[in-house]
Image: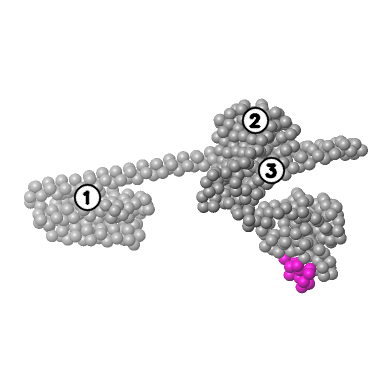
Amino acid sequence: MELKNRILYSWLGPQLDFKHKLLNLILITTFLGGFASFLVSFFCKMGTMGNIVLIIYLLVSAVCFIIANYVHKPNLAAIITVIMFDIIACPILYFEYGGLHSGTLYWTVLGLAAIWFVLPPKQAAVLYLISLIPNLAVILLGYKKPELINNVNSEWLHMLDVLMALVFVSFITGLIYMFQTREYEKQRKRLLLREETLHQALEDAAEANRAKSNFLATMSHDIRTPLNAIIGFTRIAEKNFSNTEKVRDCLLKTKTSSNYLLSLINDVLDMSRIESGQMKMELFPCNLEEMAYNIQELFANDIKNKNIDFTMDISTIKHNYVLCDELRLIQIFTNLMSNAVKYTNEYGNIKLIISESPEVKNGKVELEIVVQDTGIGMTKEFQKVIFDSYSREMTNATPGTQGSGLGMAITKAIVNLMGGTISVRSLLGQGSTFTVKLLLSIVDKELLNDEPKNVIYYFDGKRILLAEDNLLNQEIATAILHEYGMITEVAKNGMEAFDMVRDSESGYYDAIIMDIQMPIMNGYEATQAIRDLDDEKNKNIPIIAMTAHAFEDDRQLALKCGMNGHVAKPIEIPKLMDTLNSVLS
């Protein structure tokens, strides 16, 4: 059965075009019909010449089948078949088997019709005319000179010949029609499927376009909101410069709006990295207890301002140290707690429960994080899309609530990358419960050096070369460095920074803070040029990238090109000082 299927697939499979398959069908069926005719003619002694012609045709049809399927020239095979069948075999057999009284005319009609099935239109028209002329001539010649026609003396042989021709020709014609109809039906279904696929693709494209438009509209609103606050409070502070309390309040609100704007941009960038598959997990030992208390401290003020009753339970944690991406795990905690605080009204309740399963398998333990609140809850419809990008439920209970609609989508993506699960249960008006389950490797505490470190910065008199093309960034960075007692010199681009290091005395600069995207020569190129200097001290000067290229790939690229550290903009002063302290010590 398997061999039969392979043979049928080889001769009539979808890898062949329609004309090729039809040619194979005609060659196979006419071969069988010709062979049957030969047997009848041979045993009934209907004519030696006819038998010879039939044998030659059978051999030629077999050769044509090989040419079509194994030499892969079906068009040539079709032309040879037409010439042999219509121009040579049929006219000879017409004379040999009794002319108009034989079944040859049925075969002639089949042969002439088959031309149009197996050849391209122009070739078919030419060969049809070439084939029609000798067949018409034979019929007219037989009519004018009947003595040329071989008379078969037996009536039943005439009848047998006609019946056999009628059966075979009608069967072959019906088979061709059925095959052609089936192929057309397959093609029609393929076209319908293609049309449906195209229609679905158009709908998906339209939906993506709508999502893009909604996203741009949402981002425009969400970015303008903190920008409006920053610009507005800056103007208020300018007009009330002598009122210290008012200026302090404006600066505090400006800082809050700036932090929100930064978190919004980070969310969009994180989502972009997730969708492009660029977000990777960096596994390091993490202290779960310390992380939990840091999260509690992070939201302490917001919880206090809304008089929320907050409880945290970490009592079941027995393995405090686990291997995970601490930054991403904190992001999960932060997004869940942020939503809980945001959507819980005054005097509500929030619970943070971190527990672990009692079983340890292969050095791993299942960590369960539950954030439960008595907030506004969600509709069943919104629960289905809460983990989709840019999803926010707008209700009367959430007027003016800030958020990009990316937090839960990012949270789910991070959980998936960590091999975990996240689920939500919620009732509208009663609150929500988010549950995250992660399988994390246990870390032996004895192998860790987890003693707290008291870092004392001593930067007085350190000379720092700041390579930065933006004047505002120059001013900000210089002020921060001066605040810690450092002396600062500024280069406006990478080339200028390189020239200043090259022309300076050996060891003149203690470190370089290098922007990446600068004119003339960027930070990577400047770093590589400095590393190629001859002076041993200058070529090995510590270089820190301070740039808006903030992803892990950017940090790796900075280190690869010879930098000693990486600090992302906007500048986090503690991180900058830690990095400087690390490279200077």
Q: Can you see residue 530?
A: yes
Mark 3, Cα crowd under 10 Å, few <14 / some 14-19 / many 20+, is: few
The reply, left or right, for residue 99 in relation to residue 488 is left
Q: Residue at x 82, y 70 (%)?
A: 506
Q: Could you tell whether 34 is left or right of 289 in the image?
A: left
Q: CA distance from mark 2 to mark 3?
A: 22 Å
Q: Is residue 356 above or below residue 520?
A: above
Q: Earlier in the sequence, mark 3 or mark 1?
A: 1
Image: magenta residue range: 528-540
From the viewer's side, name the closer residue of 323 and 39. 323
Disc 3 marks a residue whose amino acid type is Tyr
Which residue carries the number 3 mark?
293
Q: Secondary structure at mark 3?
A: helix
Give residue 106's position: percent from left, percent from top: 21, 47
At x 60% / y 44%, what residue is drawn?
Answer: 317
Which of the labelled discs sits on residue 107, or is there none?
1
Q: Residues within 10 Å of mark 1 (few under 14, many from 20)?
A: many
Which one is earlier in the sequence, the residue at label 2 or at label 3? 3
Instruction: Please check the rendered image and state whether residue 253 is part of the magenta-colored stretch, yes or no.
Output: no
Which x, y percent locates residue 185? Answer: 36, 42
The residue positioned farthest toward the right in the image shown: 242
Residue 584 lies in quadrant: bottom right
| Front one among 141 and 81 | 81
Q: Secondary structure at mark 2?
A: loop
Q: Is residue 531 magenta?
A: yes
The three-letter code of the residue at mark 2 reads Gly
Residue hosting label 2: 375
Q: Are marks 3 and 1 in contact (CB under 8 Å)?
A: no
